[in-house]
Amino acid sequence: MFQHQFINGAVFDYPLGKIVAIGRNYAEHAKELNNPIPTEPILFIKPATSAVDMHQSFSIPQGKGAVHHELEIALLIGKTAKNITEQNAWDYVAGIGLGLDLTLRDVQDKLKEKGHPWEKAKAFDGANPLSHWLLPSAISDKNNISLQLTKNGEVKQSGNSNMMITSIPALLAYASSFFTLQPGDVVMTGTPAGVGALNVGDKLLAELHNVLRVNTSIEC
Ligand code: ZN
């Protein structure tokens, strides 16, 4: 079972709850998959059983087509949020870190074609590796948070929160108007362009704004 762990010695006792994620929050990523840029945030939920520790090597599904990496800024909710406003949205965030919104892309393409829900593509066991958490104060300018994913020595994804279509405070406020966010829940904030397939043996370096570096790999 996934446990929240803080890097800077903070204590957080809540178990992982749901993971609320947003689709197509960076225009360049929407374009690379030939998706229209949404006029309203696209939200979906991944269960706690999709989370694994990103600091350990992890496995990916076999025999179900391509598994894509989507590196995202992840937020750990610290207190109950329902119908919150953008202005104080960061008050509800206990931790900031990184998540991989792993996606069975071939499965998702087929589901999208038929207009079916895409849980099988995004909510499977192990579909959401999460890093350990930093206090949000570790990053002073919340409108300028960079993230980068390097695969086998090659930079694949590089982005910044200032490129988001829906900002982090706007996303928290919007999500909380549909789903009560509870302590232990995680919010995934969307992926920049550069998504691509993962294979067994790949070595990944995930970085958050020079404050967090996670080395990990894909095992069989
Ligand atoms: Zn995503």
Image (spheres, rainbow, N blue to C red):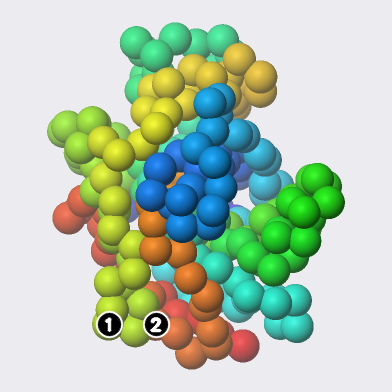
Residue 153 numbered mark, or none: 1
- Viewer can see residue 56: yes
The quadrant of the rendering that contains the C terminus is bottom right
Residue 216 found in image quarter: bottom left
Give whichever of 218, 189 is nearer the camera: 189
> Whole-Å distance between the Cαs marked 1 and 2?
8 Å
The residue type indicated by label 2 comes to Lys
Reply above or below: 105 against 45.
below
Q: Residue at x 30, y 39 (%)?
A: 163
Q: Quadrant of residue 167?
A: top left
Which residue lies at the image location 54% right of the left edge and 53% below the top edge? Answer: 34
In the image, which disc is placed on residue 121? Answer: none
Q: Are marks 1 and 2 in contact (CB under 8 Å)?
A: yes
Q: Decide if residue 170 is on the left or right side of residue 125.
A: left
Query: Is the CB–ligand 1 distance for label 2 below 8 Å?
Result: no
Q: Is residue 166 left or right of residue 79?
A: left
Mark 2 — residue? 203
Whether 107 is drawn above or below 26: the answer is below
Q: Position of residue 194 (x, y in %)?
A: 39, 63
Callout 1 amino acid: Gly
Q: Is residue 7 left or right of residue 125?
A: left
